[in-house]
Image: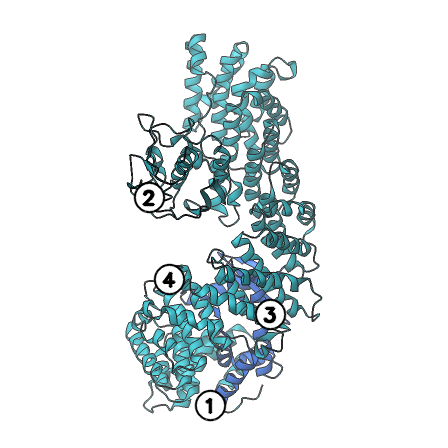
Chain colours: A blue, B cyan
Amino acid sequence: MHFDDDEKQKLIEEVHAVVTVRDAKHTNFVEFRNFKIVYRRYAGLYFCICVDVNDNNLAYLEAIHNFVEVLNEFFHNVCELDLVFNFYKVYSVVDEMFLAGEIRETSQTKVLKQLLMLSSLE
Amino acid sequence: MPAVKGDGMRGLAVFISDIRNCKSKEAEIKRINKELANIRSKFKGDKTLDGYQKKKYVCKLLFIFLLGHDIDFGHMEAVNLLSSNKYTEKQIGYLFISVLISASSDLMKLVIQCIRNDLVSRNPIHITLALQCVANIGSREMAESLSIDIPSLLVSGDTIDSVKQSAALTLLRLLRTAPELQMGEWTSRIIHLLNDQHMGVVTSAASLIEALVKKNPEEYKGCVSLAVSRLSRIVTSSYTDLQDYTYYFVPAPWLSVKLLRLLQNYPPPEDPSVRTRLTECLETILNKAQEPPKSKKVQHSNAKNAVLFEAINLIIHMDSDPNLLVRACNQLGQFLQHKETNLRYLALESMCLLATSEFSHEAVKKHQDTVITALKTERDVSVRQRAVDLLYAMCDRTNAEEIVGEMLEYLETADYSIREEMVLKVAILAEKYAVDYTWYVDVILNLIRIAGDYVSEEVWYRVIQIVINRDDVQGYAAKTVFEALQAPACHENMVKVGGYILGEFGNLIAGDPRSSPIVQFQLLHSKYHLCSPSTRGLLLSTYIKFINLFPEIKPQIQEILGSKNNMRNPDVELQQRSIEYLQLSSKATADVLATVLEEMPPFPERESSILAKLKKKKPSSVAETAIETTKEHKAMPAAQINSDGQPTLQISSPSSAGSADLLGLDIGGMSAPVDSSSSGGGGQSASDLLVDILGGPVPGGIGGGVGVGTTNGLDSSGLTVGAEENFLKFITKLNGVLYENDLLQIGVKAEYRQNLGRVGLFYGNKTSFQFTQFTTSISCPGQLSTHILYK
């Protein structure tokens, strides 16, 4: 799907509004436009994935966790600041694990190996 | 500030720190503008920047953009970075372009050229960066330019695993942008990726293959057996086998889910060994769910359950093994009361699908009480909504009253966001399962009372249609409506319904002094001024009907009709009605009046517009099997009887009496045969004719040259006697056996979505002989052809 720049910004705000009002008694899935958002909260950060209505909720919930565990390993006990200061590297992690809107690689070992190799490059 | 490793850009880190330290929005904007000016001047400057500088500045621009500010320069510099040989520089260049796609086509051409160069560079890191860029942007231009490069990269023997992974998904992206791309020559190689020894490649390829399968299931059906065997190997592996791909003691959960989804694009496998293997797989998954968990962590149970739910989806999709279906239902039943909200939610959702399968419908009903409790106690509204959907799906004649009662009760306190949908559902259920129509009237009037604002026109039109068409309920309706109107705060929709019904049938209760004509009139009129013009218009019509029914109160009514308020009402419709009705009442004789205002005749049976409205609102949640669309009702009487009473049988007759030739019948009137999986709503008439011919005297195969000149046992609706039951089954259920005799079994599987329908007819040969020259065809009888388009 293609959005231009202010549509993107609006999307971000909408998702934020939908997700942050939910608490523990809610499920981790919420309908959003014609899709659904699977999300999980880690301290002050919400990791959200927007998927099709017929996609497998729990699979994507754990995909988020898998991703977070990789971030944690890669940045050595990751915190929000790590993600902000190294934002361009976070994209690399994403592209290792998710591409074209699908799950690309799920082995943490393989992903970390690749990332470590890339960070040694000039 | 976290330490920047290696070649990290210090300037960037400093900049980010500055921004974060800004105390106010204005300060932040000021700092950003300062930096933008700095970068602009550096880019325009005489000194050419080195790679590191360019990278740093482009990265800063990107950061500023991500903060939410507009960036209108830097694209050229980013493109320049693409030609660098250094990974970090290339990466930033590609990243900037992916995030801030420039509209300029010149730049895009340049980018694609750089991508091309990288794709042939033989450097896997560069190739991967290029692929990622294509996958992230996926523009049409890219799709068209790279439509050969990407697939060849994917299937080439030289390509390393990680590049294959990226290429597969990049190709998927291109296919989504440009669906017309042909994969022809690469098909079998792509399918074969499912057998790759690298699980990551299989994971990526599975998504690609699923998309290809959806477009062209026939071409890719080779993937079914590969998928089943892969899945089987995963599911039966111990967790030391798949080291890298085991997640919290669950072997390859995401790949399992993908494979299970892939299989949902096909019917159950024909090959018995594949089928058995798949069944074993599914049973293993169900069994594992019952074993004690290997870990207490929620990740373990989520991963395990992700696979479980997808397996259940597949079981529901195949809808072929009653044992699996019942087991699935029981498993979901356990989840209904799980302490985790996620699981209860998913169980309710999946059970909805199970409720529509004939094998498991009864099993689902057992959980009715649990679902009703969920409706009342769940704290997340979306979970309550799933409970409503499930109640709707599991509703049938045996539990309709109870379920409708519960839904009405819930409606009183329901969230506004789901009220309209609930109203529609209650109305549909009440109509569908009403044995006693007084109950139906009660339900609808209750609906109006509880949720009047959400009762759309379709609903109250329908109740009036039904009351008009059914004599036995008219008196009851009049009485009930009268009582309802007496409530102090009465919804306007109630006034509309009440006004109409009393206008038609007020005479049925006029005998009782409590509801004498003048009382009725006064009751209605007391609401008059509170109503909108359209309702008032309806009431005026009621008043003139009253004049006809109850001449004794004519003067009072005429007084109202003639009042200044009405005669000079700013609303033109009201003015017109009151003037004309007044004239009508004074000028016309009693006979004329009676003729003009005769009781409304029964409405012709037509499709429930409520159903159409519900489908429009929530296409995914309508349980299609449970609903009879009256479209098929229309098809029934239109079965083929041509003018001389001879059925025009659209089955081609072989001219030679061959061996075991079922259709050794001499029949005229052929229309174009189509292949045996016919589709479209008109398929129904072919099947009932096929039913007919086989229900009639069958020559038993050999040497049959029997001419069928008689009506062949057809009854008036064009069906063989005894086929009614199956015919009804066909209308009401989406799949099952339509007809069966010693020679042939016809199964049907249908799918409807909004205005599209697909009907598959499956012919099973029960004899040990082969059928020759067996064809079928469909035709669309006269009036239906304007309503249904079939292919």
**Residue B37 visible to the viewer:** no
Amino acid type, label 3: Thr
Give the distance between the C-alpha atoms of the residues marked 3 and 2, in whole angstroms: 51 Å
Residue contact between numbered discs 3 and 4, judged by CB atoms under 8 Å: no
Amino acid type, label 2: Gly
Mark 4, Cα crowd under 10 Å, few <14 / some 14-19 / many 20+, is few
So how many labels did they put on this image? 4
Residue B551 to residue B746: above or below: above
Q: Mark 2 points at which residue?
A: B658
Q: Nearer the viewer, mark 1 or mark 2?
A: 2
Q: Nearer the viewer, residue B180 or B681?
A: B681
Q: Position of residue B296 (x, y in %)?
A: 71, 70
Dot 2: chain letter: B
Q: Position of residue B705 (x, y in %)?
A: 32, 36
Q: Mark 1 points at which residue?
A: A121
Q: Position of residue B331 (x, y in %)?
A: 65, 56
Q: Assign a secondary structure to mark 3.
A: loop
